[in-house]
Amino acid sequence: MQTIAMEDIKTRLRADLAEVLWQDLIPHSKRDAVIVVSPTLDLVSVGVAIAEDNTALVQLWIQQSLVYKPTPAQLSDWNAHVNTVFCTLIVQPFVLVRAPEALA
């Protein structure tokens, strides 16, 4: 039963993946809701772990610096390039983002 629920969450989150300009993410950044996901992780898998409150796995990713809040330097760079496109996934209350390689 739990596998079916996880697949349902995965399907919904996969459908919610979007490419968004940084300028549209700034309000989320200001409310400290942006979470950066390393390119080595699948954005949907991270979203599923957060949605299912898999604290152990999320904590492991945080400890390995694979999931983290953007640094002030990153925010400054992104704010200077507001038309840069980010791959995003909303998992309330967070917005998971994958920064383009040039701005990572």
Image: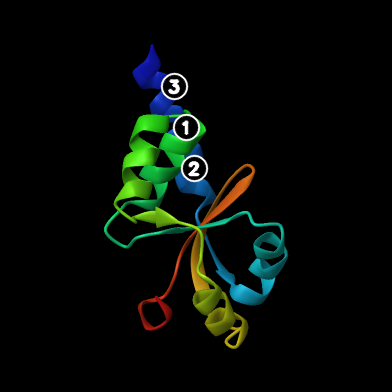
User: Residue 48: which disc?
Assistant: none
> Could you tell me if the residues under marks 2 and 3 are in contact, i.e. CB atoms within 8 Å?
no
* Residue 78 appears left or right of 29: left
Q: What crowding class fits label 3: few (fewer than 14 Cα within 10 Å), some (14-19), or many (20 or more)?
A: few
What's the residue at 40%, 26% (across, down)?
Answer: 6
Q: Secondary structure at mark 2?
A: helix
Q: Amino acid at mark 1?
A: Ile
Q: Which residue is mark 3?
A: 5
In the rendered image, which residue does mark 1 sit on?
Answer: 9
In the displayed structure, 98 sits above or below 59; it is below
Callout 2: 10 Å neighbours few (<14), some, many (20+)? some
Q: Amino acid at mark 2?
A: Leu
Q: Secondary structure at mark 1?
A: helix
Residue 43, image x and y in percent?
Answer: 40, 52
Q: Residue at x 43, y 37 (%)?
A: 48
Q: Which residue is mark 2?
A: 13
Give x and y (percent) for residue 55: 42, 31
Marks 1,2: beta carbons within 8 A = yes
Task: State yes or no: discs 1 and 3 in contact (Cβ < 8 Å).
Answer: yes
Residue 38 coordinates in the image, percent (x, y): 34, 60
Question: What is the spatial separation of the Cα atoms under label 1 and label 3, in whole angstroms?
Answer: 6 Å
